[in-house]
Amino acid sequence: MADTGIAQRAKDLLDRLSETTRFAGSLEESAARAICRRELEGAGFVCSDIPFEFSDWPARWGPPVSAAVQLAILLTVISIAKHGEPGVALAALILAAVLLGWIGGQVKRRGVLSFRYGRTGSSNLVAVRGEPRVWLVAHLDSKSQTIPMLVRIVSSVALQLASIAVAVALVTAMVGVVVPRGWWLALQLIAVTSAVPSVVCLVGNRSTGAVDNASGVVAVVLAATAADSRRGLGVLVTSAEELGLAGARAWATTAASNIKVLNCDTLDDSGGWHCMYSGAEPRQIAAATRAVAASAGLSLRIGKLIPGILADNIAFADAHVEAVTLSRGNFSTLARIHTWRDNSIALSGQGAAEAAAFLSALAKELG
């Protein structure tokens, strides 16, 4: 449990950051960034606002378009199979999956910074004290969606499972087993039902983003400004995480490869603690995390990011920098993310305060 005074400070800062929405590049986000800057400068950090440009089209339209294309592919290959060509259908499905995967990877890694349409801009807050080897990171921007995060994740996972089920049915038909026509119709219905939430999931600006991600920003600021915090420390408060990880990707292009990044994203007052990564396990951070968690008696799961979730650690992992995302929550947390219900009324500050203590200890362990 965090000290009562720290928890109250966390709550006060949460309320201030969550007074309004903080869409990337907006005046409201800039005002919230100024609050963070004052807190960090008061603790001896040298702060700079680093502007960057990006395209918001990949994040706005990539997920719904991708889901629509995937649905069209599934319906097409099922139609081909129903006409007695399961081998052709399977080949088409595999080819489409490989092509979509490659295009999706290119868009996620490069499109957000280089795509010529939908250009806009924002700024990252970079704060340095001493010579930092460890960086504490959290995104400041918020957004809403027409579909809550939990529903979108379920939709994304269900669509992938539907693709696997279609592939299994195609292989079954290829080996001579008769697949009843009703099965193909059922697979079509499952595919449509799975895809629809993702297809209609559009970006808006109706959430004040208290848990996602004012809570993470508060944890990072409190950890960095604590009296016993590590002297050599860097803090990165990113923008446009909600629009394709744009801020993190922009900063990661010039980041030193030997730094360690501890990202905080979504810290509820209850639920399980998670330390998540992308790609190969970042061994040094994982080992330090296990040691600190054991010392604190904290039950914490270390594993890959939940499918359908994006976090800034992905941008750093793509740049070959060791990075993880610390998070805490449950299904209730996911259900209110990206909705008007994600406000500071639902938070006491306890989760952010506890995360700050953990982050501070982890930064020392890594340093």
Image (cartoon, rainbow, N blue to C red):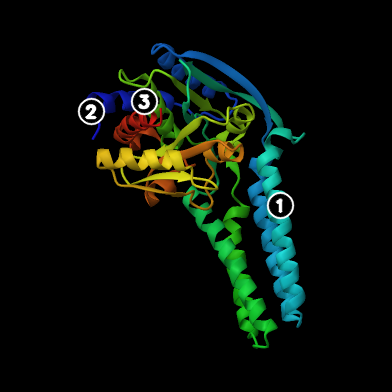
Question: Relative to residue 70, is residue 291 drawn left or right?
Answer: left
What residue is disc 2 on?
3
Of 2 and 78, nearer the camera is: 2
Question: From the image, which quarter does the C terminus lie in?
Answer: top left
Residue tagged 3: 223
Given the image, on which type of amino acid does mark 3 rest?
Answer: Ala
Residue 215 — which label? none
Name the residue nearer the viewer: 173 or 21.
173
Q: CA distance from mark 2 to mark 3?
A: 13 Å
**Is 357 drawn above or below residue 168 in the view shown?**
above
- The one nearer the camera, 218 or 315, is 315
In three-dimensional space, the C-alpha distance between marks 1 and 3, rounded to whole angstroms, equals 39 Å
Q: Which mark is residue 102?
A: 1
Total residue callouts: 3
Q: Within 10 angstroms of label 2, few (less than 14), some, or many (20 or more) residues?
A: few
Of the numbered discs 1 and 3, the one sitting upstream in the chain is: 1
Q: Is residue 248 in view from this perspective?
A: yes
